[in-house]
Image: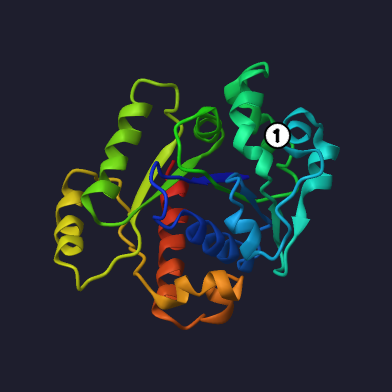
Amino acid sequence: MSIIGVYSLKGGVGKTTTAINLAYLAAKQGNQTLVWDLDPQGAATYCFRIRPRLKGGSKRLLKGRKKDLDSLVKGTDFENLDLLPADFSFRNMDLMLSDAKKPKKQFLRLLMSLTREYDQVILDCPPSISLVSENVFRAADGLLIPMIPTALATRTLFQVRDFLKGKRYQHLKLMPFFSMVDEREPMHLDIMDRLPKRHADLLTKPIPYAAEVMSMGSSRAPVGDYASQSPVSRAYEALWRDVKWRLSRR
């Protein structure tokens, strides 16, 4: 089982849209796939037309056994693709994790119980440095970091690297990439030219700013489901190939 966190310190950079569209592609290729919506706002849960609520909330989730976890997972409208929905109680998950034994390994404990059910797990992460994010860093094989090509958005990549430096996350493969790219913007083009010279691990497949992505909130589906021939759908396909290749080299 491969676990990918989609993470950024900055909101509004395309984390949820990336998580949804890559999970859709993984499932379409025959992989049993699970999306875990960790953001209390529940945008991924909404897009999959599932109610953002867990019976018993995050307390039951973190203290439960495998059978409890199985009962919380919901099927989506797409074959091979399941969802562990968000719950508003996730806003307090840090407090609950801090009370647990080995608080930074709770997600890993939960996810390892699913190795026989799923080939791919994708974590849609809230924008913070917290016990939640440290659990993601511990559990994930790769960390996808979407960045709009602006100074403030790319600055977060340096902050994440600084935080991880010297910590025990050597297994974690960072995979930053450009998201919501507008090639009419000189700043976008300039940063996309300069940043790869400083970050050799930057993925080469950017995601363009596109109306089809903005429509996900109203369509409540992945782009590949309703605009499969669009340039942005093909961009997600190229990004997914890049991600799989990068993880295969770990």
Q: Residues within 10 Å of mark 1 (few under 14, many from 20)?
A: some
Q: Residue at x 49, y 29 (%)?
A: 130
Residue sitting nearer the eye, 206 or 132: 132
Residue 132 in the image: above or below residue 221 = above
Of helix, strand and loop, which one carries label 1?
helix
Q: How many marks?
A: 1
Residue 217 percent location from the top left of the image: 55, 69
Q: Residue at x 62, y 64 (%)?
A: 47
Residue sitting nearer the eye, 165 or 179: 179
Q: Residue at x 14, y 52 (%)?
A: 194
Residue 196 in the image: above or below residue 230 = above
Q: Left or right: 235 with respect to 64?
A: left
Q: How is the image coloured?
A: rainbow
Residue that numbered label 1 is attached to: 110
Residue 153 percent location from the top left of the image: 29, 49
The quadrant of the image that shows the C terminus is top left
The type of residue carrying mark 1 is Leu
The quadrant of the image that shows the N terminus is top right
**Residue 49 position by quadrant:** bottom right
Residue 196 percent location from the top left of the image: 21, 51
Q: Left or right: 159 with respect to 9?
A: left
Residue 199 percent location from the top left of the image: 24, 44
Q: Left or right: 173 with respect to 126?
A: left
Residue sitting nearer the eye, 152 or 103: 152
**Residue 110 position by quadrant:** top right
Residue 132 in the image: above or below residue 82 = above
**Residue 208 position by quadrant:** bottom left
